[in-house]
Amino acid sequence: MYFQQFYLTCLSHASYMLGSEGEACVVDPQRDVSLYLDEAAKQGLKIKHIIETHLHADFVSGHIELAERTGAKIYLGAAVESPFPHVAVHDGDEIRMGRAILRFLETPGHTVESVSIVLIDLDRSDQPWAVLTGDTLFIGDVGRPDLSKDKTPQELAAMLFDSLHGKLLKLGDDVEVYPAHGAGSLCGKQMRPERQSTIGRERATNYALQPRSKDEFVQLLTAELPERPGYFAADAELNRLGAHPLAELQPLTGLSPAEVLERRQSGDVVLDTRPAVQFGAGHVPGAVNIPLTGQYASTAGALLGLDREIVLVAEDEGAVEESRLRLARVGIENVAGFLKGGMPAWAAAGQPAAQIVQIPVDELKRELEADASSIQVVDVRNKSEWGGGHIATALHKPLAQLESLLGDLDHTRPIVVHCKGGYRSAVACSLIQRAGFDNVANLIGGLDAWQSFGLPVAS
């Protein structure tokens, strides 16, 4: 059996291609599907099957475009109703490709329609060697149980317990586990960075799989759910209906500084994708900074939603195209254009630029020691990170809720923002400045840098 994992780092998303005797299946495809077509051609395979383990909420799938370009069938869990042609699968249904058998397990809990796929390679054995678990079982975690319109988190968590203990954990301990997401995904909270595990390893080390009753499991999973990004419901519905091909997106338009200014004044979001240092040195006033590195697309989806009109600012036109592609992967398509010539063109046109200072740890330390009350330190990490230790004088304002938590900040005092390493704080600085606070600085290296200096944290 041919088997390949494709890992999209910016979304922490894993998709898969399986093949045998000239026939191939793609599982949980990303929106830009050319990589599967190229790989199938390289391996001498024809894609005949496309499986969605569930209706993904954190990205837009390419299943419709891939089916249109290959003639392949799409397979979905029978619990979902979708208008496009597909095969509804139940427990025990199989796809046979040459010497490979793909056997479906209905594993609801993350969503009601979730399925897992048990893989059998007859050239190895007639027993399963791997299972593709979608968002049901992760490496170090299990799927979040709060993505249903009709089921409560408690109901989904109970279903998830049954799926894990009644089905997946009954597979052999040596069966390899391949999920649809890794560390950094918003679909779980404690995923480890590995991209493959085994049933036995997860049974021994995954906190959610340790011996406990169903009621205890439900309480564990639903006690402190992370905030569900607003775009999740929209993406799930888009995947249920089927997204149009990326090729149908309109070409991007280069905008002059005057046109960008006009669009910003009319309410469009100016999204600057450059690194924090470049953004801090000079940017369009009121711009939001989400650096192209890191969790760019998911951060944009969570903070901006899918419906805002966006104007891009990037280092060059290659970065513009990459920025636009990554936005489309989460369903953000309303990109009105980009600042042609970037910030050099803005400066050449005589337009004013705003700045955000990048402050090192030792400088913040000195200022706090001189007068701690003169500086507002804002920590934008999540609740569990904050509970694990924070700067004693800091105010806790998680990035996901930041814009609604600015009311108690003093416009007359400097604000220093930090996260763990600097990515989220760069975003937060731009949001705070955009809200009308002029004296905003980003702590270089975040709390990691603070602690590397041996400086204390409160608990």
Image: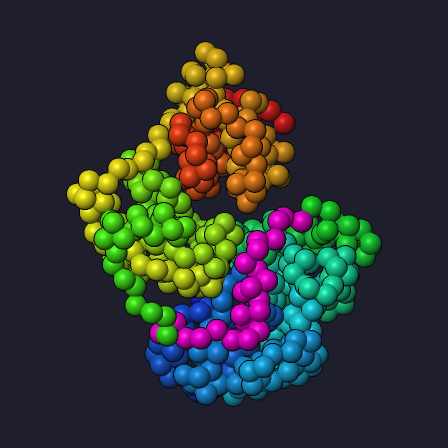
140 to 367, vertically: above or below:
below
Q: Is residue 314 shown left or right of residue 350?
A: right
| The C terminus - image quarter | top right
Q: Nearer the viewer, residue 1 or 85?
A: 85
Q: Is residue 192 shown left or right of residue 330?
A: right
Give the total of numbered labels: 0
The magenta stretch is: 225-247
In the rendered image, which quarter is residue 415 located in?
top left
Q: Nearer the viewer, residue 404 or 7?
A: 404
Residue 420 x, y percent position in the rendering = 49, 37
Instruction: Tell me, yes or no, if residue 119 can be seen here.
Output: yes
Query: Tell me, what colour scheme is on the image?
Result: rainbow
Q: Residue at x 73, y 51 (%)?
A: 222
* Extreme residue in the left direction: 348
46 to 107, vertically: above or below:
below
Q: Residue at x 49, y 67 (%)?
A: 60
Residue 336 x, y percent position in the rendering = 35, 60
Residue 240 highlighted magenta (yes or no): yes
Residue 119 highlighted magenta (yes or no): no
Q: Residue at x 40, y 21 (%)?
A: 362
In the rendered image, which quarter is residue 135 located in?
bottom right
306 to 3, vertically: above or below:
above
Instruction: Tell me, yes or no, if residue 316 can be seen here.
Output: no
Residue 446 x, y percent position in the rendering = 45, 33
* Extreme residue in the top direction: 370
Q: Nearer the viewer, residue 431 or 168?
A: 431
Residue 38 x, y percent position in the rendering = 35, 76
Q: Is residue 80 shown left or right of residue 270?
A: right
Q: Nearer the viewer, residue 162 or 177?
A: 162
Q: Is residue 88 shown left or right of residue 445?
A: right
